[in-house]
Image: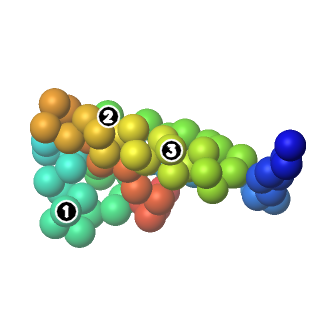
Amino acid sequence: MTQTSILQCPTPLEVAVILGTKGVDAYYRGEIRIDTLLGLGPVKTFNFLTVPEVNAFIQGVDATQGFLDALATDDLRR
């Protein structure tokens, strides 16, 4: 049996999820400041140790499209 090892990143990878139509629409119009997006709706951040964890999380958020206005991104600024 082979064992696959997944390397951990030296610093946690952060992904933000923008929730709600107003926040998602503002992001698509170019808004990336968390404080501004928070004024439009919830923004939750999540930290992960590996890239496969991030990818699985983003796929899960993407799967909600059509049921929930949510967008996973890694380019927001504080």
- Dot 1 amino acid type: Tyr
Q: Residue furthest front?
A: 1
* Callout in the foreground (3, 1): 3
Distance in Å between CA atoms under marks 1 and 2: 16 Å
Q: Earlier in the sequence, mark 3 or mark 2?
A: 2
Q: Answer with left or right where residue 65 lies relative to residue 35.
A: left
The one nearer the camera, 5 or 43, is 5
Which residue is denoted by mark 1 in the rendering? 28
Q: Residues within 10 Å of mark 2 (few under 14, many from 20)?
A: some
Position in image of residue 65 (x %, y %): 20, 41
Q: Earlier in the sequence, mark 3 or mark 1?
A: 1
Which residue is denoted by mark 3 in the rendering? 56
- Dot 2 amino acid type: Pro
**Residue at 86% over, 43% down:** 1
Q: Are marks 1 and 2 in contact (CB under 8 Å)?
A: no
Position in image of residue 62 (x %, y %): 31, 45
Q: Earlier in the sequence, mark 1 or mark 2?
A: 1
